[in-house]
Image (spheres, rainbow, N blue to C red):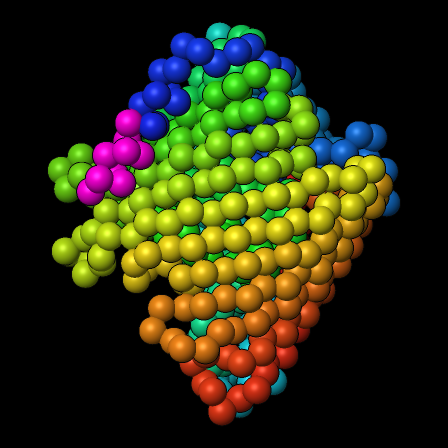
Amino acid sequence: MKLARTLCRAIFLVVLSPLAQPAVAQEGGLSGPSSTAADLTPGDGLTNPQFRSDFPRNALPGFYAWKDGLAERGVKLGFDYLALGQWSDSDLGSGNASSGIARFFGTLAAGGGHSFTFKIENRQAYGSVAPQFFGFDGGAVSITGTAFNDSGTILTNLFWTYRNPDGRFTLQAGQIDVTDFLDVYGLVSPYTAFQNLAFNTNPTINAPNPGLGIAAGVALGSNFYAVASIADANADPSEPDTRVFSDGETFKSLEIGYTSGQDRIYFDNIHLTVWQSDASEELDRAEDYGAALSASWFIDNTWMPFIRYGVSEGTAALYERSLSTGIGWYGRNTDVAGLGLNWAEAKGFDDTQFTAEAFYRFSISPGLQITPSVQYISDPLLDTSQDDILLVGLRARVLF
């Protein structure tokens, strides 16, 4: 409880701090690479991206003329569908998993620095096992297909944002997904980059599902920043509710970071994140808390080496300790390749588990991407009779 009170005081100071100095507005505010704002922006934030094709814009000129007209009036809309198939050589489980995600999302600029964001999703498994649980099905403590589950229809985003005119301060409140901005870096998105949770939001963080919350970001000069949040620790986006106001069980986070410039906050970034999640008698969950350290830097707008470490106390986070490192490569045609290595300890296991993932995202156009991937898991913790597991995957995304 002492840690919870300390985090709450820190968040209060971040939200109301009068000492923050003006800085260049960071694009998207609190919106990281997996957020609605990023989904509405073609490319990866690189200047002058060179796409191979204009599909599907060239096939649906009337539809895109309508969308462009709405955008000129401050309404940006997006529709996409993602599909993921994975196959494994594990001695256990079904041997394959697949799932699809349909998403409708958008933003409305309301003037004066105010805007509204929404995202509705439908997630369906094609077979008996969804990729999010395929690692467990095969004998590993590993989420091999982050976000590709069988949740059905969920409300991911429905929040208000205020960004002050000089860009030094951003506030969000409503139905938020803390993984949009929590401990992020350039390769964090499971929709466009790595698939394994070891290389997405740090697997030692017990991040809640999307739910009611409030988050704020402050630019502390031209290079430093702080981001803080309080959100419903028991959220269920398939049945949004306001129970957090009565049960008071919340997830808190505070991040302090350094960047080369506020417009490159998710490319050149070094940060420390501390977090705490309340216990829940109803869900039989103990209190969790921990810290994560992340460093990544975009070299020549092409190479992104990264190293990420996390430690947690409690029972709900996937790992107690996790160390990930790797590198990403970005092409002008918005192709992306990544190689990641992870070492992890999990609660209740004496041994450690090693995971590697490699992927190549082939961008046919801003609206069509194909991503083959390979994952290798050594010493799977749930089945010590297996030395390793090899898993191949194929992800596709079409965006309108």
Q: Specify whether residue 123 is in view.
A: no
Q: Residue at x 33, y 39 (%)?
A: 252
Q: Quadrant of residue 75?
A: top right
Residue 313 shows in the view: yes
> Horizontal placement of 295 versus 181: left or right?
right
- In percent of width and height, residue 121 lies at 46, 47
Residue 290 coordinates in the image, percent (x, y): 37, 49
Tell me where residue 20 appears, x and y as whole percent.
Answer: 48, 14
- At 23% from the left and 47% from the top, the residue drawn is 278
Relative depth, front residue between 128 and 282: 282
The stretch drawn in magenta includes residue 8 = yes
- Tell me the chief SS of the magenta region: helix
Is residue 44 shown above or below 227? below
- Report whether 295 appears left or right of 339: left
Residue range of the region highlighted in magenta in the rendering? 1-9
Q: Position of residue 127 (x, y in %)?
A: 49, 74
Residue positioned 59% across, 58% down in the render: 324
